[in-house]
Image (tube, grey):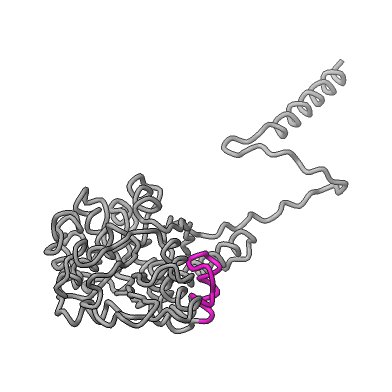
Amino acid sequence: MKQKLLSLGLSLALVLGLAAGCAPKAGLEESPAPETSSPVAETPPAETVAPYQTIRLGLLNGPTGMGAAKLLADSDAAFAQAEEGTYDTTEGTFFHYELTLGSDPSTDIVPKLNNGELDIAAVPTNLAATLYNKAGSIRLLALNTLGVLHILENGDTVHSMADLGGKTIYSINQGTNTEYVLNYLLEESGLTPGEDVTIEWKTSEEVTALMASGGIDLCMLPVPAATSVMMQNADVRDAIDLNDVWQDVGAAGTFTMGCMVARSDFVEEHPEAVDAFLTEYAASIAYVNEHPEEAAALIEQYGIVPKAAVAKAAIPQANMVCLTGDELKGISDYYEVLYAADPTSIGGAIPDDNFYYIP
């Protein structure tokens, strides 16, 4: 009898022990055991997750986007290594830039900034001031593009702004720096826009195609669109560089067309990400300026400019810079000019000091 009780007790202990061993442990996800013919399955080492953070970056086609090409390439290379598990984690955290590329800032970039889909974005400088004046929801991080506007002629009759009297000029980007600067320089040259000079506003694609095909004789385009036209039509010449006119009329400040902004809440919550971006962005712009051939291939790869040959030819004229910190306040003189010409061009007021991101 004792032996039966002992056998029953051992059997019960064995069953309970097996049940306890098979029960899932608290706090861990249950995963099925791998099927294997080996008596003992080795547990693989835990997968190393690369320490990266995602920054949602908005760029525009053309010079305001060109300078970021190397930054994007380096970020994507690190991200690919992270996905493959080959990223060297001793390098520390890196930032992966999730790109949104657009051609019209008012439709492709601004709505996404406003609803939080973008963290950092390239926009025209006058639009940056307007956004700040409307809600104070953005901060200016960097000035990235100086003057890149050129008046092109299929002919040889225009050599100064005064020569535009009585003519029709085709242009793009109405409602941005392009319109306000053109109007200001025409008026400073003694011409009234809409009366002495007719301005036809069209898309970049339309003006580029018309000028390259000889369908129109006079247009104003920024680099690299202007570069592309002259490469396609040898009869088109660079008649006027608006940087020269800006200086000739004695305009205050530096003619500055493009900048980088960030959502105010992103700056407040992630200052380390903003500072890292500015460091990487400055290095990227320096690389693009110093290595035009290699950079041009990257610019084409990311669709910022359709053809590498155009990008390479445009880089020396693209006036790409990276002005940050206290240097940002230098744009206030430029804003004064725009405000005097048309207060609505910058949202009705000169931005106050809180507009500038100065760590």
Residue 301 within the magenta-colored segment of the rendering: yes
Q: Main secondary structure of the magenta part?
A: helix
- In this picture, residue 103 sits left or right of residue 342: right
Quadrant of the image occupied by residue 348:
bottom left
Q: Position of residue 98 (x, y in %)?
A: 48, 57
Along the line of sight, the residue nearer the viewer: 162 or 68: 162
Q: Can residue 322 be seen in this view?
A: no
Q: Where is residue 46 in the image (x, y as percent from the top left)?
A: 64, 54
- In this picture, residue 42 sits left or right of residue 62: right
**Residue at x 82% of width, y 25% of height:** 11
- In this picture, residue 155 sits left or right of residue 41: left
Quadrant of the image occupied by residue 289:
bottom left
Q: In which quarter of the image is the N terminus?
A: top right
Along the line of sight, the residue nearer the viewer: 290 or 319: 319
Above or below: residue 117 compared with residue 28: below
**Residue at x 34% of width, y 56% of height:** 270
Q: Can residue 265 be seen in this view?
A: yes
Along the line of sight, the residue nearer the viewer: 313 or 296: 313
Residue placed furthest toward the front = 166
Q: In which quarter of the image is the C terminus?
A: bottom left
Quadrant of the image occupied by residue 324:
bottom left
**Residue at x 60% of width, y 64% of height:** 81
* Magenta segment boundaries in residue numbering: 293-310
